[in-house]
Image (cartoon, helix red, strand yellow):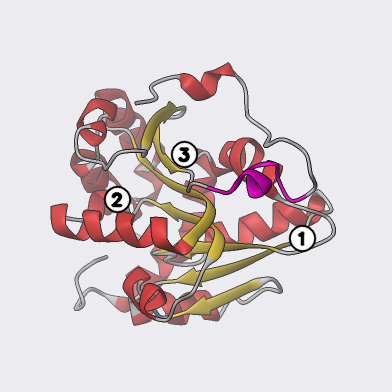
Amino acid sequence: MDDPGCDLAALRRTYALFPLVNGLVAGWRRAYRERLRPLLSADRDTTVLDLGSGGGDLARALVRWSRRDGLRLSVTAVDPDGRAHDFASSRAVRGVTYRRASSADLVAAGERFDVVVSNHVLHHLDDEARAAVLDDSARLARRLVLHSDIRRSRGAYLGYWVLTLPLAGSSFVRVDGLRSIRRSWRADELRSVVPPRWHVLRRPPARLWLVHEPLRSPGEAAGRDGRAPVRSSRADGEGAS
């Protein structure tokens, strides 16, 4: 998929399959319930930035879930790859804005969002690019950064190998997914390379969440509605740095 010269039809089929594959393995429904929903309001918009948004399926899912809960959410989905931007824009929905941009572009423009998220981005980055994206994320987010990625393991590899057998040859979902698992992180590896105040959490199925909560003033820390911030269950501490 990262090859600029790859087959465009296969690439578009891959983007089209992302809602199915991510729905099965990426665990964003849990991330929404535990981390994002407690920050949302029925009275005012919460803004989310989806970095490296690919086909835009995560942005659309977050808006859909928030509407079902009667909460107001607007998502800006950005990707520097024009092919991804074109595909995502063709599936536009209310509440999602698609832009061809990088995190550095948004920092340079002085933009801010309540929450910054990404899905399956970290393992694509070398050390320099990862450090830049994490720094940009911290600058862009007012309340929360949540980068979700694969937790490398033999079980994850074998499970995905079986799960995607029916998709072999029709898209890049299988070959690129298996390659991504091989390139992804274990919790201890990721924990050793992230800056202070970033926390690595293990989540099923075979997930790592890299979480950063920017420092806020005492008034902001009480939350928009005056209540204390909502914390999730004791499982949030599992694997935290």
Q: What element carries label 2?
A: helix
Q: Where residue 70 sits: x, y (%)?
A: 84, 53
Q: Mark 1 points at which residue?
A: 72
Q: Residue 44 carries which label?
A: none
Q: In which quarter of the image is the N terminus?
A: bottom left
Q: Nearer the viewer, residue 29 or 228?
A: 228
Q: Where residue 119 sits: x, y (%)?
A: 42, 52
Inter-mark Cα distance, 1 to 3:
26 Å
**Is the C-beta separation of discs 1 and 2 under 8 Å?**
no
Q: Is residue 26 above or below residue 64?
A: above
Q: Name the residue under label 3.
A: 25
Q: Is residue 155 above or below residue 7?
A: above
What crowding class fits label 3: few (fewer than 14 Cα within 10 Å), some (14-19), or many (20 or more)?
some
Say which of marks 1 and 2 sits in front. Answer: 1
Inter-mark Cα distance, 2 to 3:
16 Å
In the image, the segment drawn in magenta is: 216-224
202 drawn magenta: no
The kind of residue on which mark 2 rests is Leu
Say which of marks 2 and 3 sits in front. Answer: 2
Mark 1 or 3, nearer chain start: 3
Inter-mark Cα distance, 1 to 2:
28 Å
Say which of marks 1 and 3 sits in front. Answer: 1
What crowding class fits label 1: few (fewer than 14 Cα within 10 Å), some (14-19), or many (20 or more)?
some
222 drawn magenta: yes
